[in-house]
């Protein structure tokens, strides 16, 4: 059974991510892995870093108690199979360890302090995770809800045909939620070139079993065009392939001149190529 890994830090944000993950797991017949990591305590003796074993034991026990309490308060977990993992160290390291161990389909995680895309990654682990794991990551701003999603948009790049395996996760997700998939290509040129049209036709063969449509939007800034489209079409989930890291970087940094178009709550799904 494939698994969904949900990083848990016991906050309302991770509780919201868990609630979303429960329904995704239900729809897709998957198991949840609730992952909590805690930082190792370090003391210094003569300038030499020293991890104190007794403190690790105390933190482990505290984390296990917090996880038990968190599960007790989230009764919806009874609807799906799940288990927990508590590891010492950075989230990214713990997540990569979990991904090596499990056949994971997705990572679903919350992002703290976010009301819009330009704030989504600030002060959170999501940006680091997205850039460094080989698994589709769904990043959910606080209070985001994808449990009833019907409109999924994938940023199409008609200059490179993606491999079938790289877009299979979004196709599977689209089918599970009976959603419509929008393939949106942003370009500053007025018309598509012949090669771009051929690549778009190639994408069609992957999408025969899902409701979908192709869209072209002219804009001199890919970021502005993509986010404007998402806002205009009331998109529930915006999907990008990881080769668009430069675009993800710009979204993460944001700018005052783009505040209006970027200030929208938007769940993101990043897929490795």
Image (cartoon, rainbow, N blue to C red):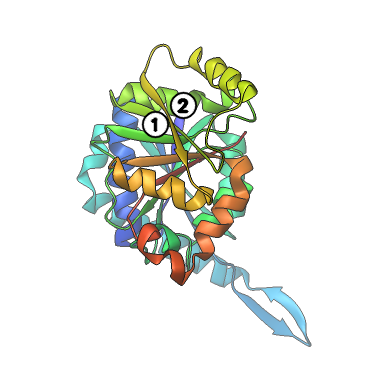
Left-right relation of 269 to 174: right
Decide: is 257 above or below 150.
Answer: below
Residue 161 position by quadrant: top right
Where residue 2 is drawn, which disc sits there? 2
Name the residue nearer the viewer: 94 or 88: 94
x, y percent for residue 74: 24, 49
Residue 188 position by quadrant: top right
Asked whether the residues under the numbered discs 1 and 2 touch, taking CB atoms below 8 Å apart as contact, a structural biologist would say yes
Decide: is 96 above or below 260.
Answer: above
Where residue 31 is drawn, which disc sits there? 1
Q: Residue furthest bottom?
A: 46
Residue 13 position by quadrant: bottom left
Kindly tell me whether residue 189 is visible in this rendering.
yes
Please name the residue shown 37% across and 58% down the image: 261
How far, Cα to Cα, is label 1 from label 2? 6 Å
Task: Describe the element under mark 1 as helix, strand or loop.
Answer: strand
Where residue 70 is drawn, which disc sits there? none
Q: Residues within 10 Å of mark 1 (few under 14, many from 20)?
A: many
Please name the residue shown 51% across and 60% down the image: 252
Q: Residues within 10 Å of mark 2 (few under 14, many from 20)?
A: some
Decide: is 65 above or below 168.
Answer: below
Closer to the chain start, of discs 1 and 2, is 2
x, y percent for residue 132: 63, 49
Name the residue nearer the viewer: 204 or 106: 204
Q: Residue furthest front?
A: 190
Name the residue nearer the viewer: 223 or 195: 195
Left-right relation of 50 to 247: right
Name the residue nearer the viewer: 162 or 86: 162
x, y percent for residue 149: 27, 36
Quadrant in which the C terminus appears: top right
Tally the marks. Answer: 2
């Amino acid at each position: 059974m494939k698994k969904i890994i949900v990083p848990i830090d016991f906050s309302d944000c991770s509780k919201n991510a868990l609630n979303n993950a429960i329904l995704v797991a239900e729809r897709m017949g998957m198991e949840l892995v609730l992952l909590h990591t805690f930082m190792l305590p370090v003391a210094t003796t003569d300038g030499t870093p020293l991890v104190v074993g007794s403190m690790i034991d105390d933190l482990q026990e505290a984390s296990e108690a917090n996880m038990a309490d968190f599960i007790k308060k989230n009764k919806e977990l009874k609807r799906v199979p799940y288990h927990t993992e508590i590891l010492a160290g950075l989230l990214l390291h713990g997540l990569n360890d979990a991904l090596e161990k499990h056949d994971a389909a997705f990572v679903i995680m919350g992002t703290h302090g976010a009301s819009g895309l330009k704030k989504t990654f600030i002060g959170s682990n999501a940006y680091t995770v997205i850039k460094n794991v080989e698994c589709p990551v769904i990043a959910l701003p606080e209070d985001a809800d994808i449990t009833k999603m019907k409109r999924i948009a994938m940023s199409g790049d008609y200059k490179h045909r993606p491999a079938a395996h790289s877009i299979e996760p979004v196709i599977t997700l689209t089918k599970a939620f009976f959603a419509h998939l929008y393939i949106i290509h942003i370009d500053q040129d007025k018309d598509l070139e012949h090669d771009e049209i051929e690549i778009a036709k190639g994408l069609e063969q992957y999408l025969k079993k899902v409701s979908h449509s192709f869209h072209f939007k002219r804009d001199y800034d890919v970021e502005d065009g993509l986010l404007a489209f998402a806002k205009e079409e009331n998109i529930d989930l915006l999907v990008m392939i990881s080769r668009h890291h430069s675009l993800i970087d710009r979204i993460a940094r944001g700018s005052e001149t783009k505040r209006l178009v970027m200030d929208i709550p938007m769940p993101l799904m990043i897929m490795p190529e």
